[in-house]
Amino acid sequence: MNTKLLTLSAAALAATVALAGCSTGSAGPTVTPSSSTSPKDSMHGMDHGSSMMPSSSPAAAAEHNAADTMFAQMMIPHHEQAVEMSDMMLKKQDIPAQVTSLASKIKAAQGPEIEKMTGWLTNWNEPAMAPSGHAMGGGMDGMMGDDDMKELAAAQGADAAKLFLTQMIAHHEGAVTMAKTETTAGKNPEAVQLSRDITTSQEAEIQEMKDLLAAL
């Protein structure tokens, strides 16, 4: 097997976070009653939902920083490739049941996480993709190159199962590296929790795949 892994070190990602700043949003302006408005009038307006009270709080959407944004922007395509690899395995014949079961589990877990992270970026008013050449060095930790994906697509039977496990171990290791960076540098509570969940689940799957690979 000739696996070419495109890598981005955690240090490079951390440097990107530092350069991008600690926050990508800020709360909206505070509305102050004019000097001609009495405290009573002010309270009256607040009680009746007048324009003196903002209709929504932009602070909720602003509760994230550059690390959260980069985590979502990079983990989405990373997850998408894992789902693609899993789909390849599920379409093949003569694959060991434990390997197809693992592929199904990966697809079922990462599909909803893609939707969740996409929703965050929308709510944060951030682009779905990182800017071109955004300190990514042409790739991300653990991502497969075009040749790797073609090799997996062409493989059959036990050879395909071994290749899938080998590639997915490296893929998961890259995801764990990115997740741990988010756990340390992130601000948004949901994003940080997801990073912890990814670390826990994928480290367990890495061990499972190593065991399966040794048994093939």
Image: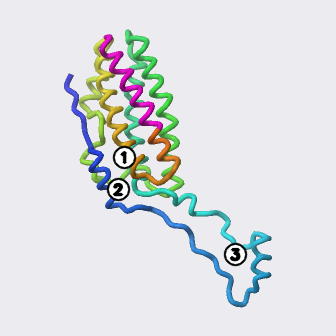
Measured Cα–Cα span from mark 2 to mark 1: 10 Å
Label at residue 52:
3
Label at residue 181:
1
Residue at 43% over, 22% down:
103
- Answer whether labels 3 and 2 touch (C-beta < 8 Å): no
Residue range of the region highlighted in magenta in the rendering: 197-216
Residue 116 in the image, given as x and y percentages of width and height: 52, 43
Q: Residue furthest front?
A: 184
Report which quarter residue 90 is drawn in.
top left
Q: Nearer the viewer, mark 2 or mark 1?
A: 1
Q: Residue furthest left?
A: 2
For label 1, count other residues whose C-alpha is less than 10 Å away and answer few (under 14), some (14-19) or many (20+).
many
Residue at the disc numbered 2: 17
Report which quarter residue 147 is drawn in.
top left
The disc, 1 or 3, on the residue closer to the chain's N-terminal end is 3
Q: Nearer the viewer, mark 3 or mark 2?
A: 2
Q: Can residue 50 be found in the magenta stretch? A: no
Which element carries disc 3, helix, strand or loop?
loop
